[in-house]
Image (cartoon, rainbow, N blue to C red):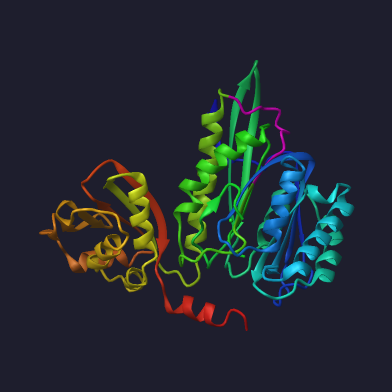
Amino acid sequence: MTRNGSSASLPLGFRWGATTAGIKASGKPDVAIAVADQPAIAAAMFTSNQFVAAPILIGQRHLKATEHKMRAVLVNAGNANCATGDPGLEHCRQSCAAMGDAIGCVFDEVFPSSTGIIGVPLPIEKLVAGIPKAVAALGNTPDHADAFAHAIMTTDTKPKVASESFEIDIAGEVKRVSLWGCCKGAGMIGPKLANAAPHATMLVYLFTDIAASASQLKEILHDSVEKSFNAISVDGDMSTNDTVLLLASGASGVALDANITNEFDAALQRVCDSLAYQVVDDGEGVTHVVTLQLTGAASDEAAATMAKSIANSPLVKTAWSSGDPNWGRLLAAAGKAGVPFDPATVTIAIGGLEVFANGVRSAAWDETATHERMSQRHYTIAINFGMGSGTCKFVTCDLTHEYVSINADYST
């Protein structure tokens, strides 16, 4: 078995397309579709926000109705179709029916997604009119996949894609399994994705040509998401439309079994990790991407709770924006999380430079050098609580004036 991520190819059995339907005020592409040549097996995780958009509800119903078999993904950008009442649900159903008619499948084999502003009626006429144009643009080349990744963007400044592949020898025949994923998201990023509970900002689409059951995909997807998309934050706000969808076409001829589960799991994790990091790196107004590496906590859960408290603290995030090595804010944010720890056993290093140890400022404290490390776009803050074996890796960012400007003017 040989990993070959450097020359990863698109997974077999899928086509991608995009078009401009006039939903975005900018006039940029705003309808993206993906079509499976044969029904693909699906697993999905959704926002756990109690206030959810129409496509979340419809998508869940379609997965249940088809026993997790999907022929198409239909995404519109520029309108979240959220807080739109019964008309929003009906518009979602109409768009799925139009997509089904266009490719020759039943409406509930279409998985819908929407992203954009909340509370504005979806211009269903524009979306339905754009579907045939998107279908006409379908193809299975990197350019087609790239068009899909571009069309789902809203406040993103660049598309986010990742791919992996590996080869396996089956009875003397070498076969390749490929994965490709894309996502969008730049603000309103504080996901808490769940398997089934209703979970328009972070949308993630993952495609693979391995053959697998829905239960297999669900288990692997959950583990990958917990370590990636559920371990990032831009502003700590959970969206109404967050979705992660994994589709498996089976077109590689390789079945997911015990012999390759670890290989596939690792490949999917690398794709999810890359996409999650790209979301933070493209966060609204972001100038610094900070990886929190917490160790020595009483448990992994305790480490994650403190990491999220630090990552979402406005005081901490604004200090990061100017490269201010204010380690006191880190400890205060960890302390408010409600997780017991003894400051006398804590050690903090910023960018590899120790700033706090055993309850006081470190003897190695160098404010100028630490500020220089924090002036870099990417750096790590390592905190060891000296209590146990609990760990958490969490990717977050600073909070800047640009973020405020973007979101102050978003609806206008």
Asked whether 252 falls inside the magenta stretch, the response is: yes
Assign the N terminus to one quadrant of the image: top right
Residue 100, position as x, y percentages in the image: 85, 52
Magenta-colored segment: predominant secondary structure: loop
Q: Position of residue 234 (x, y in %)?
A: 46, 65
Which image quarter is the C terminus in?
Answer: bottom right
> Is 317 above or below relative to 206?
below
- Would you say 144 lies left or right of 221 here? right
216 in relation to 351, above or below: above
Of 268 and 245, the residue lying toward us? 245
**Residue 127: percent from left, percent from top:** 80, 66
Is residue 147 something that shows in the picture? Answer: no
> Is 391 on the left or on the right of 38, as rendered?
left
Count of picture labels: 0
Residue appearing at x 67%, y 27% in the figure: 254
Residue toward you, 390 or 6: 390
What's the magenta region? 246-257
Q: Quadrant of residue 312?
A: bottom left
Q: Which one is in front, 317 or 306?
A: 306
Residue 146 lies in the magenta-colored region: no
Measuring 37% from the left and 52% from the top, which residue is drawn there? 304
Seen in the picture, residue 64 relative to 401 is either above or below; the reply is: above
Q: Residue at x 28, y 40 (%)?
A: 389
At x 63%, y 63%, the residue is: 52
